[in-house]
Amino acid sequence: MSTQIDHELEVGTKLEPVRISPDLREVVRAEPPAPPAPKPMRRGPSPLVVGALAVVAVSALALGGWQWWYARGHVTSDNAQVEGHIVPVLPKVSGYVAEVRVEDNQSVREGDVLVVLDDRDYRARLEQAEADLAVAEAAAGGKGKAAPGQAVAQYAAARASVSEAEARDWQAGRDLDRYRSLAAQDVISSQQLESYQAAAKVADAHLRASRDQVDAAAADVQSARAKVSAALAARDQAALQLSYTRIVAPGTGMVSQKDVEVGQLVQAGQPLFSVVPLSDVWVVANLKETELAHVSAGDRVSVEVDTYPGRRFAGRVESLSPATGAKFSLLPPDNATGNFTKVVQRVPVKVRLEGMSDPLRPLRPGMSAKVTITT
């Protein structure tokens, strides 16, 4: 528009004078605005991306299907731990500790001497018991003795007295019969006959007394033999207590929690340490009650212990607990009082490991484990 006006002014076209404001002139002389930029065209997803997503979706579906199929025949729980016997070592008699032959975490075998107590008092008791046994055997007469015991000798003497009394009683009876015949013939007086009658009664009384003495002597023999048995038992008890002064390992395992020192006075039944046999361990898995429908004794089990990643131990279900773990707690739940909130309970399942124990990977009671049961 500005160019046209200038051209008409140059050719002399007569126009009415028009006043153009500076702002308008600037607008007229301004360049026309640039056309808008074209919008970019939308492209569809790349075939590579589509293929990758398809592979991921198929893999997810396959994994989900496999997990569903696997869960139908397997029960898995990481609420499990290794269990074992922890055998306390206790003295059976009191005494001062003379020797301690083990330290913590030391391997021992069954029968190894672990602690020795001062045995002088117990040796003296044994000697006293042996002396009492000798006295009792001397009174009763023991096996292998050259001379009979005092009680046996008294019994033999009583039997001899009975034989003598029987002979005198027989003789007195014969004399009485003869003198009765003589008295009937008036050969002897009545006084003489009465004296022979009295003598016969005395002989009969002596016979009865002798027989009573035999019975008493036989009772003395039995009493003496009983005293021998009592003295023998006391001797054996003293010997047994003497043997208890040497405290031995109750089984093969490792010593733990040692709490005894030389010179210490220990009492009977006081815990000194424990022996843990690592060769006899098992696993206890606390399964939810909703997982036990198909679990039974004999099912195969795969055990993984946190201490040995990647190492699997084979085993089988040995037994299921007769009650939930909560029932054996110090304060068992009582759903009959207060507000009720249902909580899934857990039932201990004992798993016995199969095969020989691995000395390079020993299982220790208390280790955390994960079990997978094939139902």
Image (cartoon, rainbow, N blue to C red):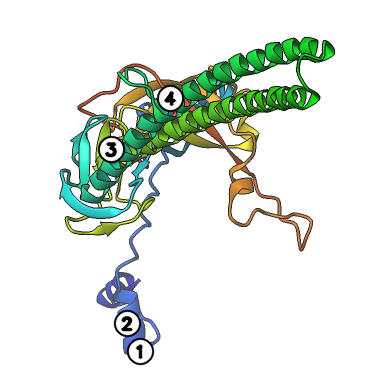
Is residue 263 found left or right of 349 in the rendered image? Answer: left
Label 4 belongs to which residue?
Answer: 153
Label 2 belongs to which residue?
Answer: 25
Label 1 belongs to which residue?
Answer: 21
Secondary structure under tag 4 reads helix
> Residue at the location (34% across, 86% down)?
23
For the question of whether residue 46 can be seen, the reply is no
Q: How far apart in space, not on screen, are marks 4 and 1 (Cα)?
A: 168 Å
Q: How far apart in space, not on screen, are marks 2 and 4 (Cα)?
A: 166 Å
Q: How far apart in space, not on screen, are marks 3 and 2 (Cα)?
A: 130 Å
Is residue 90 found left or right of 161 in the rendered image? Answer: left
Residue type for callout 1: Ser
Marked residue nearer the N-terminal end (2 or 4):
2
Secondary structure under tag 1 reads loop
How far across and down, in percent of the image, does residue 97 sit?
21, 53
Marked residue nearer the N-terminal end (4 or 1):
1
> Residue at the location (37% across, 51% down)?
268
Q: Quadrant of residue 55?
A: top left
Label 3 belongs to which residue?
Answer: 243
Q: How far apart in space, not on screen, are marks 4 and 3 (Cα)?
A: 38 Å
Marked residue nearer the N-terminal end (4 or 3):
4
Residue type for callout 3: Ser
Label 2, residues with CA under 10 Å away: few <14, some 14-19, many ≥20: few
Secondary structure under tag 2 reads helix
Residue type for callout 4: Ala
